Image: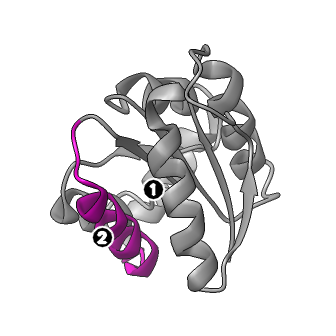
Amino acid sequence: MKIAIGSDHAGFRYKERIKQYLATLAHEVIDFGTDSEEPVDYPLFIRPVAHAVAAAEVERGVVLGGSGNGEAMAANRVKGVRCALCWSIESARLARQHNDANMLSLGQRLLTEEAALEIVRVWLDTPFEGGRHVRRIQLLDAD
């Protein structure tokens, strides 16, 4: 799978670790930055990930920040993006299964590294159950 990733300074450390993890699973990762823990404005790094997902240049996107809230909000402003802020394995599973989330947002300050990696794994492995949800999502994407 081709996956875009981006973070602000507060999510940089986990971004780097998640990139390594995705590589071990043979995913192709495109890193949109940031490249350090120096303070930056998160939309500069999150919106390019969202645009890559919306344009189908990648299949999925992962964004990170301190809480993940701002990153999810910035990503969801892009038409065609369904970014879920996940804080547990169950929230990640449901985001894929019920909402067909094509982007994942994580908060480095709120999760252990192990939890973040497990959330990524579950989010990648969980299929969308489709059915009645597909039409509703298509209608929302058309707005």
As drawn, 57 above or below 39: below
The structure residue drawn at horizontal position 70% and vertical position 38%, both measured from the top left corner, is 33
Residue 70: % across, % down:
43, 22
**Residue bounds of the magenta highlight:** 110-130
Which label sits in the foreground, 2 or 1? 2
Q: Given the image, on which type of amino acid does mark 2 rest?
A: Glu
Query: Is 124 colored magenta in this rendering?
Result: yes
Q: Secondary structure at mark 2?
A: helix
- In 3D space, how far apart are the residues under numbered discs 2 and 1 (Cα atoms)? 16 Å
Query: Is 55 colored magenta in this rendering?
Result: no
In the rendered image, which residue does mark 1 sit on?
A: 101
In the rendered image, which residue does mark 2 sit on?
A: 118
Quarter of the image with the N terminus is: bottom right
Q: Secondary structure at mark 1?
A: loop
Most foreground residue, 118 or 93: 118
Q: Quadrant of residue 141?
A: top right
The structure residue drawn at horizontal position 66% and vertical position 40%, both measured from the top left corner, is 50
The structure residue drawn at horizontal position 69% and vertical position 42%, both measured from the top left corner, is 49
Q: Is residue 4 among what the camera can see?
A: yes
